[in-house]
């Protein structure tokens, strides 16, 4: 019998059981006696039967899909997380469906609504804060949700301490003697990760008796171009900063590019630090001092957590992953 024509009913006849029993062997094997389960599996192996996704979904009542909604697909940080999610979910028989919202709360609402309408078994989201409409959708959804980077209290999440990351970057520059430190973040209104990192920088400065004047903090697009624009605006001040913290690595890399375009030395004339630790950050010149965020592990652990929840093996819990300051060549002691 040709393999591509073998059906569940063929396996049932060969094993001498009903099609419903074969279906249970696929979706709920613990409900069958060991003898029956062995008979069904031997029949499936003899005939070369492999249940397709539709058969598994029909048998289990699940779509075997998990949706992930990202702020953007242009940032390598989220791409790495998605790749880790894909690998982990694929190993468990799940397909990953991806949507992005470009930091637009209304677009995120539509992305969540669309994925739920498509019957995803679970959702993975970035950040804890979102539009009330999105929160309402999640509250009535049957699908479990895992939050990443930040998570609301009582939810399931795989997170990092973004405020600590900001404080670590600030403390490092302060230890190098810097007192006038600028910060360039993405928009903090719809981005709780950037908001927390900025708060962490302020806290780190406050520990040393320093403050962050409004003139030294600016919001830009989370890109190299945004970093250049933010750096240029800080250089226009009567007293420009001696060091700048980027809310993400791409922004900090933009700062380095802008400083070098102006003939300035990094870190001789300007020190730069950041948060994320993109792969490229170790290879630019000078290499970027940054707080390492375990992006790959965030993605893998979020996928593992949602699979465990779908299997009933885990309830809501928040795992906070460790972060680490990676000191490279873009930060140095303040020039005398």
Image (tube, helix red, strand yellow):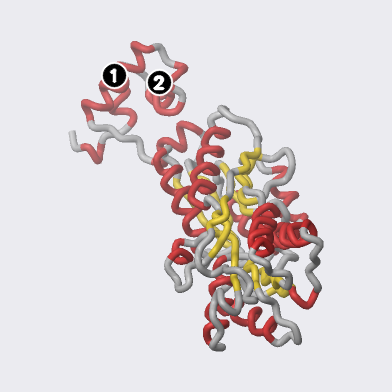
Q: Nearer the viewer, residue 261 or 268?
A: 268
Q: Measuring from the top left, give residue 119's x and y in whole percent.
A: 56, 46
Report which residue position mark 1 lands on. 15
198 is higher (above) or lower (below) than 63: below
> Crowdedness of circle 1 by 10 Å Cα count: few (<14), some, many (20+)?
many
Q: Measuring from the top left, give residue 74's x and y in whole percent.
A: 51, 67
Secondary structure of residue under mark 1: helix
Residue 109, can we see it?
no
Res 125 label: none
Q: Are marks 2 and 1 in contact (CB under 8 Å)?
A: yes
Q: Quadrant of the N terminus?
A: top left
Q: Nearer the viewer, residue 188 or 85?
A: 188
Mark toward the start of the polypeptide (2 vs 1): 1
Residue 128, can we see it?
yes
Report which residue position mark 2 lands on. 21
Residue that appears at 37% across and 24% down: 22
């Amino acid at each position: 019998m040709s393999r591509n024509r073998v059906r569940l009913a063929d396996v049932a006849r060969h094993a001498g059981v009903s099609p419903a029993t074969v279906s249970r062997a696929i979706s709920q094997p613990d409900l069958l006696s060991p003898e029956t389960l062995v008979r069904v599996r031997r029949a499936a192996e003899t005939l070369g039967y492999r249940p397709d996704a539709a058969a598994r979904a029909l048998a289990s009542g699940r779509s075997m899909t998990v949706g992930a909604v990202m702020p953007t697909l242009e940032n390598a940080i989220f791409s790495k997380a998605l790749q880790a999610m894909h690998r982990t979910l694929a190993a468990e028989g799940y397909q990953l469906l991806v949507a992005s919202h470009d930091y637009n709360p209304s677009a995120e609402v539509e992305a969540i609504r669309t994925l739920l309408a498509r019957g995803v078994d679970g959702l993975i989201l970035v950040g804890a804060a979102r539009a009330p409409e999105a929160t309402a959708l999640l509250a009535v959804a049957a699908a479990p949700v895992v939050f990443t980077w930040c998570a609301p209290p009582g939810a399931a999440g795989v997170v990092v301490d973004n405020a600590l990351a900001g404080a670590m970057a600030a403390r490092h520059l302060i230890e190098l003697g810097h007192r006038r430190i600028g910060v360039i973040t993405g928009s903090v209104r719809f981005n709780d990760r950037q908001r927390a990192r900025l708060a962490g920088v302020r806290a780190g400065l406050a520990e040393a008796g320093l403050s962050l004047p409004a003139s030294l903090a600016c919001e830009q697009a989370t890109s190299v171009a945004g970093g250049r624009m933010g750096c240029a605006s800080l250089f226009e001040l009567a007293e420009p900063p001696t060091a700048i913290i980027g809310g993400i690595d791409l922004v900090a890399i933009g700062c380095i590019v802008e400083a070098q375009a102006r003939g300035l030395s990094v870190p001789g004339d300007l020190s730069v630090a950041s948060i994320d630790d993109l792969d490229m950050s170790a290879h630019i010149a000078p290499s970027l001092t940054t707080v390492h965020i375990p992006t790959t592990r965030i993605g893998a652990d979020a996928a593992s957590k949602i699979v465990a929840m779908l299997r009933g093996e885990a309830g809501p819990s928040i795992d906070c992953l460790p972060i680490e300051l990676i000191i490279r060549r873009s930060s140095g002691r303040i020039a005398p």
